Amino acid sequence: MKLLEGKTVLVTGGSTGIGRAAAIGAALHGADVAINYYTRDEDAESCVAEIEALGQRGFALKGDVALPATATEFVAQALERLGKVDVLVSNAGICPFHAFLDMPVDVFERTQQVNMHGAYFMCQAAARQMVEQGHGGAIVAVSSISALVGGEFQTHYTPTKAGVHSLMQSAAIALGRHGIRCNSVLPGTILTEINKDDLADPEKRKYMETRVPLGRLGVPEDLAGPIVFLASDMAAYVTGAALLVDGGMYVNLQ
Ligand code: RM4
């Protein structure tokens, strides 16, 4: 069963990791897909190739989500090239691990700008188009388990993930009257570029693995189903919600 047949899905940070898995997952479920990305040109091109190989239309647009113009241009291009905007997956994010007491201002500010400001601008731009279209829509934000718990080297990052989910809660209220649903997925520790260096430490990786009742760290494909579900009409009465996708890590105290 294709859950997104005929839909147009926009994904930020779509060239690798969770964003890429969401983009391919949406195409597998019958959607045309546009991806935003920032640095990895070849990965973006190969993602679009996979979307097209599935018989769906797609394109990639390079842009820094921290800039408001990136959001308005992404939506404008989707409108011109794919005809509409039905779903936004707001995924783009960074997590340059760093200690709290000597956190450089630029590292702190860049993390806020990409993760929080970028999510805000993209959600706002997509919502404006959805409202204009007049037939509702869905926004799925990639928040994190880190919206609920902390990380010693993530003091700049965890507040942005809490903020992204809080944005979904408030946007759900603001957009409900337009038939636009806003929800968050909260991934646990998923093996992607964002934590490649951090998890290169075998002791850290072993510790994180022992935290997971399902016995393994996640992979981006583990997020595709939950994101497609929240984007689809299967979740027609779900808005303002948070869906942990963490292998049970959050509840695993002892
Ligand atoms: C997630 C979670 C993971 C970490 C990534 C970077 O929110 O904290 O453990 O690897 O961020």
Image (cartoon, helix red, strand yellow):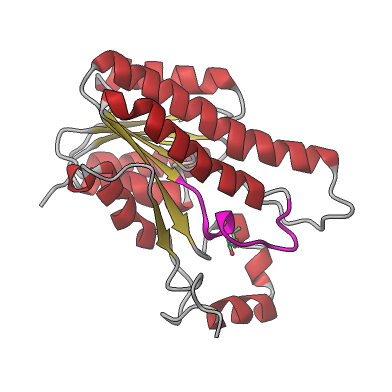
Q: What residue is shown at x 72% (from left), y 48% (from top)?
A: 156
Q: What residue is shown at x 53% (from left), y 60% (from top)?
A: 145
* Residue 149 forms part of the magenta stretch: yes
Q: Nearer the viewer, residue 179 or 63?
A: 179
Question: Vertically, is 113 above or below 23?
Answer: above
Q: Quadrant of the C terminus?
A: bottom right
> Horizontal and vertical percent for residue 210?
55, 83
* Residue 39 forms part of the magenta stretch: no
Q: Is residue 92 visible?
A: no
What is the magenta segment's predominant secondary structure?
Answer: loop
> Horizontal and vertical percent for residue 32?
24, 34
> Horizontal and vertical percent for residue 94?
62, 46
Q: Nearer the viewer, residue 44 or 152?
A: 152
The residue at the far right in this view is: 102
Q: In terms of image quarters, where does ligand 1 lie?
A: bottom right
The residue at the far bottom in this view is: 254
Q: Nearer the viewer, residue 90 or 147?
A: 147
**Image: magenta residue range:** 142-155
Q: What residue is shown at x 45% (from left), y 29% (from top)?
A: 123
> Horizontal and vertical percent for residue 227?
33, 50
Q: Is residue 250 visible?
A: yes
